[in-house]
């Protein structure tokens, strides 16, 4: 972690993706996987052993929430989108739900002056409830305190210490300041942009298990679409300037954002979900509703189930 360098962010964009700053440090070496059994001498057996290790978390205490102290489209080979683990035990499959931003560094401000952190926390709690109800008892909510710059590395370190099987960071979207317009809500000046809407999913090639990260990202995008939701297309457009990102799949809304610290430095498959735009006045109202949180939670849960056991996609509950 001593080599991690956080690049400065322009003041005008401080509230936009401010909790997932870029890092100029080169990706470190991939962590060592669990040793394969002695008899797994062939490449095929070694691969099977690696997959089994991914689905088996380390011994842990009872499920708990974790709170930290302050401090153009690319064509993909379908075979690259298959989950690395063929099956898993849901009761032992450990998922870390990272609540984006902190109470002290709240992220973007919605069109009606509600902090992104509030939206992130409520949605992450609903996803946690849904996953646990579906048998994923090891699901953990990761809450970080303090200023964003000081808490960012801490949240990654906590996720790595938990030895999770999957890391999912929950956020809500805004836009660069150049797209913002002014309006007044309940007697207070605010800013909005109704130009863009939709969810988006991000992965980093710097993650030591990018292939598995992409597998889950594809499942998540597919399930969000199955809920009737549309992804945010603006990240692939030239008008986004330095915020433009490579679109990996134009069907599911999966983007590459290689410099995101929470994706690049976690030692497990990691995905960031921008659940929807809270700077868009119409979509903000939808994102604030229990119905929309249920839709997104159902999509996430379906993606996790299929990631854990691909047979879910065809047979449903077994």
Image (cartoon, rainbow, N blue to C red):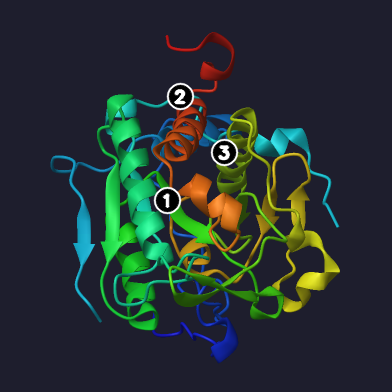
Q: Position of residue 167 (x, y in %)?
A: 42, 50
Residue 273, visible in the rendered structure: no
Alpha carbon of mark 2 to alpha carbon of mark 3: how far? 17 Å
Quadrant of image for the N terminus: bottom left
Q: Report x, y in % for residue 271.
A: 52, 52
Q: Earlier in the sequence, mark 1 or mark 2?
A: 2
Distance (Cα) linking label 1 and label 3: 13 Å
Q: Going 40% across and 56% down the picture, which residue do you hit?
A: 119
- Figure check: 14 above or below 89: below
Classify residue 71 as left or right of residue 256.
Answer: left
Nearer the observer, 212 or 222? 222
Residue shown at the point (38%, 72%) measured from the top left: 106
* Residue indicated by mark 1: 167
Q: Which residue is mark 2?
A: 87
Residue topped by disc 3 = 220
- Horizontal placement of 233 versus 175: left or right? right
**SS at mark 1?**
strand
Name the residue at 78% across, 45% down: 250
First of labels 1, 3 by sequence position? 1
Residue 318 sits above or below residue 263 on the image: above
Quarter of image, res 318 = top left
In the depicted view, which residue is nearer to us: 284 or 60? Answer: 284
Viewer-closest of 3 and 197 = 197
């Amino acid at each position: 972690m001593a080599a991690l360098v956080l690049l400065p962010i322009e003041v005008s964009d401080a509230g936009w993706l401010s909790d997932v700053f870029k890092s100029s440090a080169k990706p470190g070496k991939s962590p060592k996987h669990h040793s394969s059994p002695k008899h797994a001498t062939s490449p095929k057996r070694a691969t099977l052993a690696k997959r089994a290790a991914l689905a088996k978390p380390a011994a842990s205490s009872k499920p708990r929430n974790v709170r930290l102290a302050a401090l153009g489209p690319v064509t993909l080979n379908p075979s690259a989108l298959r989950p690395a683990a063929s099956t898993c035990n849901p009761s032992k499959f450990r998922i870390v739900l990272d609540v984006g931003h902190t109470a002290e560094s709240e992220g973007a401000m919605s069109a009606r002056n509600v902090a992104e952190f509030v939206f992130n926390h409520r949605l992450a709690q609903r996803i946690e409830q849904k996953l646990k109800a579906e048998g994923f008892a090891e699901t953990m909510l990761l809450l970080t305190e303090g200023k964003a710059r000081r808490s960012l590395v801490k949240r990654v370190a906590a996720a790595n210490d938990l030895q999770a099987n999957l890391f999912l960071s929950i956020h809500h979207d805004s836009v660069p300041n150049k797209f913002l317009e002014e309006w007044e809500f309940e007697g207070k000046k605010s800013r909005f942009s109704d130009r863009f809407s939709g969810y988006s999913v991000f992965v980093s090639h710097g993650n030591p298990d990018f292939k598995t990260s992409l597998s889950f990202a594809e499942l998540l995008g597919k399930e969000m679409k199955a809920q009737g939701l549309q992804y945010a297309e603006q990240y692939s457009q030239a008008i986004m300037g330095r915020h433009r990102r490579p679109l990996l799949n134009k069907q599911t809304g999966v983007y590459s954002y290689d410099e995101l610290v929470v994706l690049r430095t976690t030692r497990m498959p990691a995905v960031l979900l921008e659940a929807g735009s809270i700077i868009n006045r119409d979509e903000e109202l939808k994102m604030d509703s229990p119905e929309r949180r249920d839709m997104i939670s159902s999509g996430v849960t379906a993606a996790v189930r299929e990631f854990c056991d691909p047979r879910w996609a065809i047979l449903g509950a077994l």
